[in-house]
Structures are given as C-alpha cells and as structure tokens.
C-alpha cells in the first residue's frame, strides 16, 4: 500500500519540476494579439514590455504598467484534477499580500503565454488579454 503512494508522490515531484521549466524565459508583449481595451490608444507606450519568468520561481515585468497589478512576484505550478480524474496543471503569477490572494493564470501556447483578464491596479479599467511571445530561453 505504501509503495504506490511513494510512486505517486515522486511522479508529482517530477512533473512539477519538468512543467515549470517550460515556462521559464523572457517573453515580449505582442500588441496585435493582446486586447488592451481602455489602454489600446496608448499601445505604443507598452511596446517592448517584457515578462521574465525565472528558474528561481520569481517573475518580473520590465515596466510598471497600469494593467498589471505588480511589477514583480512569484510564480508556481498548481496541480488539479479534472472531471475525468486526469491530473492537470496551471502556472500562476502571485503578487503577494497586496493582491489579497488573487493571482493571474498563465495559459501556455507554442512559444507564448497568455494572461486572461489580468489583475490591474485599477479594477474599473480591467483588460481582456495579454499575449506574450517567447524571445529568450
């Protein structure tokens, strides 16, 4: 009975290490694929915005922008079970105590990540989507 449990724990640890590596790197905001909503008129101001996801489980945006809650924070991989009992994962960006436990989920794409409805500094000016293309490993 204890061996299957040990195997499951080791498998989860292996998955958590390998899944995190696929997210690390530097990503640049793709203005064309993002939906900046209220901030679209100022899109030139946000060109070159970089998101760096570091192997030490921290992340950093290259600029302080109004549609991102904090410029720096921690990221983690969270696992969950789906309805058909398959283990799945998501990468979350945590902004610390100031965010009151709220987080942004990163959706992976091929050489890209997407943040849907990111936390903003001003809740009245929420945007729909930020799309980042990977530029460096």
Image (cartoon, rainbow, N blue to C red):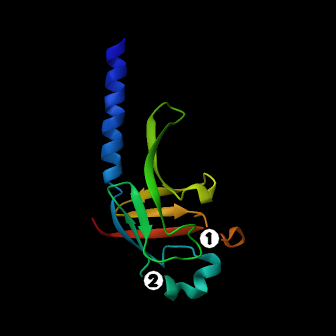
Q: In what element is the residue under mark 2?
A: loop
Question: Is 10 left or right of 82, judged from the image as shown?
Answer: left
Q: In what element is the residue under mark 1?
A: loop
Rounded to the nearest angstrom, the CA distance separating label 2 from label 1 is 16 Å
Q: Nearer the viewer, residue 80 or 120?
A: 120
Tell me where residue 118 appears, x and y as whole percent: 57, 64
Residue sticking out furthest to the left: 137
Q: Counting other residues with Cα less than 10 Å from the Cα at mark 1, is it few (<14), some (14-19), or many (20 or more)?
A: many
Tell me where residue 121 appears, x and y as whole percent: 63, 70
Note whether 110 is above or below 15 in the view shown.
below
Task: Give the residue at x 50% y 69%.
Answer: 71
Task: Give the residue at x 57% y 73%.
Answer: 35
Task: Give the residue at x 39% y 64%.
Answer: 112
Residue sticking out furthest to the right: 124
* Residue 113, picture quadrant: bottom left
Could you say which disc has been placed on residue 66 in the image? none
Note whether 52 is above or below 44 in the view shown.
above
Q: Could you tell which of marks 2 and 1 lies nearer the N-terminus? A: 2
Tell me where residue 131 appears, x and y as whole percent: 47, 69
Could you say which disc has been placed on residue 47 in the image? 2
Question: Is 107 left or right of 41, judged from the image as shown?
Answer: left
Task: Give the residue at x 60% y 68%.
Answer: 128
The residue carrying mark 1 is 127
């Amino acid at each position: 009975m204890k061996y299957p449990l040990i195997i499951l724990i080791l498998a989860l640890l292996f998955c958590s290490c390998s899944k995190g590596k696929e997210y690390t790197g530097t990503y640049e905001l793709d203005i064309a694929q993002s939906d900046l909503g209220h901030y679209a008129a100022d899109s030139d101001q946000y060109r070159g915005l970089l998101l760096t996801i570091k192997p030490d489980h921290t992340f950093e945006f290259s600029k302080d922008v109004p549609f991102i809650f904090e410029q720096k924070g921690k990221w983690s991989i969270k696992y969950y079970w789906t309805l058909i009992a398959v283990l799945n994962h998501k990468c979350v960006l945590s902004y610390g105590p100031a965010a009151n436990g709220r987080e942004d989920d990163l959706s992976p794409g091929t050489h890209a990540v997407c943040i849907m409805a990111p936390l903003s500094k001003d809740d009245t000016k929420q945007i729909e989507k930020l799309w980042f293309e990977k530029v460096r490993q």
